[in-house]
Image (cartoon, rainbow, N blue to C red):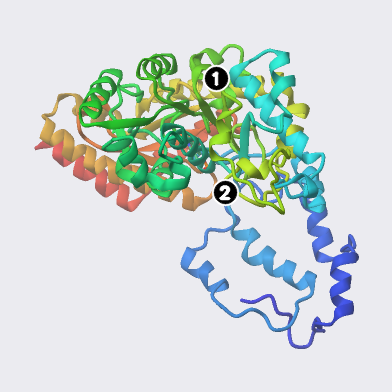
């Protein structure tokens, strides 16, 4: 399908006066786009109905709608094109705002985000420099200051001194957690190999010469094995290599194992390998657990090494007076990543990295004559990205409209809902809770009571076989539930200590949408159980498990 009208309809014509129109004339309310625009504005939640996707359609079929590499020779009327979009794109997009969509960190937006995003788009500011952003630059600096204060909580004089200081920055705004983590390790790398007598610094001379000059065998980034894959990308682009990410085992609560960390540090030092950064996770992507940050800060202080905390997901827990102590020690980190497009309910494309020391970002500073002049307040001199949208405006809006107290309520509600859901899973008898939520994220799987009991008594070999069948069961239930289109949980693979060594597939639930009720969660469990009983594949798997138990 292509967005071309029927042959009997009028065609759009490419000429300059028509082109001027698309820059100057607004779509009127009675055009297709105008109507859709109103419908979305007035009824955001109802737009895609109660379904996760409008209709389940195979991806291969959807690809056929987007198969032509040809750039249309002739223009298309906006209305014709919009109809095409509605049928092929919008109808097949994912309804992340649905309260039954609890599988990922992407969730509902407050409705004010839509008109405010429109203002942002209309202004089309470029934050790379003041000449294309003016007031947006101090606003972004203020947003960074607010998040800095949330983490580091310095006094007013500190922020009056540093927030708008041309020679420093409290953080960098970027498109997301990945860019934030890359920026943090970039700073850590440049601080580890600074310029000195006879060496102009790693930023100029590169990794190879840095190792030689500093007489060092290599570098390591130490992070638990639950670390986000963005650190692998960071190591790759920073030229230190993915192998320099050293995954430390976790304890039974999916937190970094401190003894193993200490012995790894000892080994690395004996090999002449420098620690580029120790990384703590405040809310792992898969299980939502928080590393012992205070302990990590002690170790970083002992070793004199850089400490970064990846709080992309869990950072906003700091809004909650009751739950923020879970992140105790975060204020001792050299840098912290927070994603606003996750638990701050800002649209996609809003990440930040905050630095304890406002001089840190100087280690990655770049200047150019026509832009980013030295001494200017241009934000582009210390961001990885060049041209950047004014998304900080949406974070500023959310911080003001929702407020600290509003965020506190949202965070506390998510954590309470997750805890209640965990109780429900445990009480159900036919589900096994795999990770109890520390924040608002938990994992579980469907295991009928009889099989749960058998798992406790069978030998390790049989247990591994049963777990392997259960993995197929979990996968099939998850896929089938997604296909039926009412709710969505994701799945991941974990190696919990209780099954010493068996890797198991689990459902993963993230409870960030305030509209997700206990009733919806009860329904999700009901549907999963029903799929297990009704589905042809799952009944076969369950029969095979029964056989394993019986023999
Ligand atoms: C989501 C996430 C990231 C990556 O952030 P993006 O915005 O997807 O680039 C990094 N770390 C953690 C812990 C995350 O949850």
Name which residue lies at 19% across and 28% down: 454
Compared across the picture, whether 156 is left or right of 490 comes to: right
Q: CA distance from mark 1 to mark 2?
A: 24 Å
Residue, far front: 198
Residue, far bottom: 8
**Location of residue 548 by image quarter:** top left
On-image quarter of the N terminus: bottom right
On-image quarter of the C terminus: top left
Q: What element does badge 2 sit on?
A: loop
Compared across the picture, whether 29 is left or right of 149 comes to: right
Could you tell me if residue 457 is visible in this image?
A: yes
Q: Residue 209 location, x and y as percent?
A: 35, 45
Q: Residue 489 location, x and y as percent?
A: 47, 40
Compared across the picture, whether 153 is left or right of 193 comes to: right
Q: What element does badge 1 sit on?
A: helix
- Residue 140 vs residue 6, the one in the foreground: 140
Query: In the rendered image, which residue does mark 1 sit on?
Result: 416
Specify which label sits upstream in the sequence, 1 or 2. Answer: 2
- The reply to whether the residue tagged 1 has its Cβ within 8 angstroms of ligand 1 is no
Q: Residues within 10 Å of mark 2 (few under 14, many from 20)?
A: many
Residue, far left: 551
Name which residue lies at 69% across and 17% down: 158
- From the viewer's perspective, is residue 514 above or below residue 468? above
Name which residue lies at 83% across and 59% down: 35
- Residue 299 vs residue 60, the one in the foreground: 299
Frontmost of labels 1 and 2 is 1
Query: In the rendered image, which residue does mark 2 sit on?
Result: 52
**Location of residue 411 by image quarter:** top right
């Amino acid at each position: 399908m292509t967005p071309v009208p029927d042959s009997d309809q009028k065609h759009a014509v490419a000429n300059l006066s028509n082109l001027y129109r698309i820059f100057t004339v607004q779509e009127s309310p009675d055009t297709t786009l105008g109507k859709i625009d109103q419908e979305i504005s007035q009824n955001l939640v109802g737009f895609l109905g109660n379904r996760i996707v409008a209709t389940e359609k195979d991806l291969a079929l959807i690809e056929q709608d987007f198969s032509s590499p040809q750039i249309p020779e002739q223009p298309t009327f906006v209305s014709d094109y919009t109809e095409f979009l509605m049928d092929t794109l919008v109808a097949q997009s994912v309804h992340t705002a649905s309260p039954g969509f609890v599988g990922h960190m992407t969730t509902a937006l407050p409705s004010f985000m839509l008109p405010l995003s429109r203002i942002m788009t209309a202004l089309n500011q470029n934050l790379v420099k003041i000449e294309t952003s003016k007031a947006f630059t101090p606003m972004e600096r203020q947003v960074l200051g607010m998040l800095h204060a949330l983490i580091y909580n310095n006094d007013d004089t500190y922020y009056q001194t540093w927030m708008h200081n041309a020679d420093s920055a409290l953080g960098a705004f970027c498109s997301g957690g990945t860019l934030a983590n890359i920026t943090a390790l970039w700073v850590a790398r440049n601080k580890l190999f600074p310029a000195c007598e006879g060496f102009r610094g790693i930023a100029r001379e590169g990794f190879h010469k840095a190792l030689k000059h500093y007489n060092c065998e290599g570098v390591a980034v130490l992070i638990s094995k639950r670390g986000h894959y963005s650190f692998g990308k960071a190591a790759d682009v920073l030229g230190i290599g993915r192998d320099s990410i050293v995954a430390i085992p976790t304890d039974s609560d999916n937190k970094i194992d401190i003894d193993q960390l200490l012995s790894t540090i000892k080994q690395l030092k004996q090999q002449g390998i420098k620690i580029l950064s120790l990384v703590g996770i405040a809310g792992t992507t898969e299980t939502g657990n928080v590393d012992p940050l205070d302990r990590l800060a002690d170790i970083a202080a002992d070793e004199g090494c850089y400490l970064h905390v990846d709080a992309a997901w869990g950072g906003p827990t700091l809004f909650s007076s009751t739950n923020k102590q879970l992140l105790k020690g975060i204020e001792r980190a050299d840098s912290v990543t927070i994603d606003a497009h996750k638990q701050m309910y800002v649209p996609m494309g809003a990440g930040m990295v905050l630095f304890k020391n406002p001089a840190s970002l100087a280690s990655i500073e770049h200047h150019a004559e026509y832009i980013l002049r030295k001494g200017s307040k241009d934000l582009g001199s210390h961001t990885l990205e060049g041209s950047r949208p004014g998304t900080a405006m949406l974070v500023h809006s959310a911080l003001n409209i929702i407020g600290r107290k509003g965020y506190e309520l949202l965070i506390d509600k998510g954590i309470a809902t997750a805890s209640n859901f965990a109780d429900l899973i445990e009480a159900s008898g036919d589900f096994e809770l795999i990770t109890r939520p520390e924040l608002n994220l938990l994992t579980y799987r469907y295991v009928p009571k009889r099989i749960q009991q058998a798992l406790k008594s069978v030998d390790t070999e049989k247990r591994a076989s049963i777990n392997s069948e259960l993995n197929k069961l979990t996968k099939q239930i998850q896929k089938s539930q997604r296909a039926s289109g009412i709710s969505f949980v994701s799945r991941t693979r974990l190696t919990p200590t209780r099954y010493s060594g068996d890797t198991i597939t689990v459902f993963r639930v993230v409870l960030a949408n305030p509209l997700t009720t206990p009733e919806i969660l009860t329904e999700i469990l009901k549907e999963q159980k029903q799929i297990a009983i009704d589905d042809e594949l799952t009944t076969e798997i369950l029969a095979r498990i029964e056989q394993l138990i019986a023999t």
